[in-house]
Amino acid sequence: MIPGFIYSTLATIPTTVEWYPKVGMVMIIANVFAILLGKLVIKNPVAQPPLPMPMMFGGMGWSELLATMSLGHILGLGAILGLANMGYL
């Protein structure tokens, strides 16, 4: 048996946008922006263990890449939900 307050809560949750190429492009752009931001902000990148193509990522290591990609996904989530709420996606 489901309590009544759950039904009222479900009615207030907005529907999320389904995945299609525009949504993917927004996430890619957000991740590239986060990597570029990481290249500018990280003063002493730890290059151990190194990435396969260190010149592409500005000498970042795996830990910096994972950190910037995590930030990129957070930014992408906010951008996708915001653009979907405004009706652009």
Image (cartoon, rainbow, N blue to C red):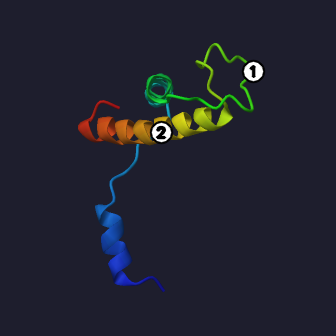
What type is the residue that disc 1 sits on? Answer: Pro
Residue at position x 33%, y 79% in the image: 5
Q: Secondary structure at mark 1?
A: loop
Question: What residue lies at 30% left-to-right and 73% top-to-bottom?
Answer: 8
In this rendering, would 38 be left or right of 64? Answer: left
Q: Which residue is mark 1?
A: 52
Mark 1 or 2 closer to N-term? 1
Q: Is residue 37 above or below residue 6?
A: above
Structural crowding at the residue carrying mark 2, measured as other residues with C-alpha within 10 Å and reported as few (<14), some (14–19) or many (≥20): some
Residue 14 is left or right of residue 58, and the answer is left
Q: Quadrant of the C terminus?
A: top left
**Front residue of 22 and 48:** 48
The furthest residue to the left:
86
Q: Amino acid at mark 2?
A: Leu
| Image x and y of residue 59, in percent | 63, 20
Residue at coordinates 35% horizontally, 42% vertically from top-left?
81
Which image quadrant for residue 51?
top right
Q: State the image quarter where residue 41 is shown.
A: top left
Question: Looking at the image, which is closer to me, 20 or 51?
Answer: 51
Give the answer, above or below, for where 81 lies relative to 41.
below
Q: Are marks 1 and 2 in contact (CB under 8 Å)?
A: no
Q: Which residue is mark 2?
A: 71
| Image coordinates for residue 54, horizontal then vertical, percent | 68, 18
Query: Horizontal placement of 87 versus 3: left or right?
Result: left
- Image coordinates of residue 27 in percent, x first then y, are 47, 31
